[in-house]
Image (cartoon, rainbow, N blue to C red):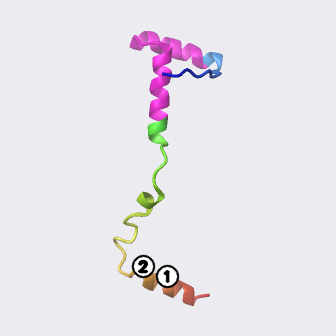
């Protein structure tokens, strides 16, 4: 495991220390858990996954819709 040096405000360190006593884990473990949760929440997704199925409930074919929009130009 690699180490990283980070600056954390004093009030947040105190809160981490209090929480570490309650949960009986080290401050470092709390920080590792927080980083893991953050990365899971904001992990990059493949752009194709985001768009997959967008037209599922539409009555019009995607190409027909595109053609109709371009006719407005």
- Residue 39 position, x and y percent, is 48, 37
Task: Find the distance from the CA under tag 2 to the CA under tag 1.
Answer: 6 Å
In the image, what residue occupies the spot 34% across and 72% down? 57
The tally of labels here is 2
Label 1: which residue?
Answer: 66
Label 2: which residue?
Answer: 62
Relative depth, front residue between 63 and 22 = 63
- Residue 20 position, x and y percent, is 46, 13
- Residue 4 position, x and y percent, is 58, 22
Relative depth, front residue between 50 and 2 = 2
Residue projecting furthest to the bottom: 71
Q: Is residue 10 magenta?
A: no
SS at mark 1? helix
Asked whether the beta carbons under mark 2 and mark 1 sit within 8 Å of each other, the answer is yes
Q: Residues within 10 Å of mark 1 (few under 14, many from 20)?
A: few
What span is colored magenta in the figure?
Answer: 12-38
């Amino acid at each position: 495991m690699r180490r990283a040096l980070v600056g954390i405000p004093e009030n947040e360190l105190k809160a981490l220390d209090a929480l570490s006593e309650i949960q009986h884990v080290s401050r470092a473990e709390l920080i590792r858990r927080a980083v893991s949760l953050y990365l899971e929440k904001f992990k990059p997704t493949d752009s194709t996954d985001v768009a997959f199925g967008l037209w599922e409930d539409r009555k019009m074919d995607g190409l027909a819709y595109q053609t109709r929009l371009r006719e407005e130009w």
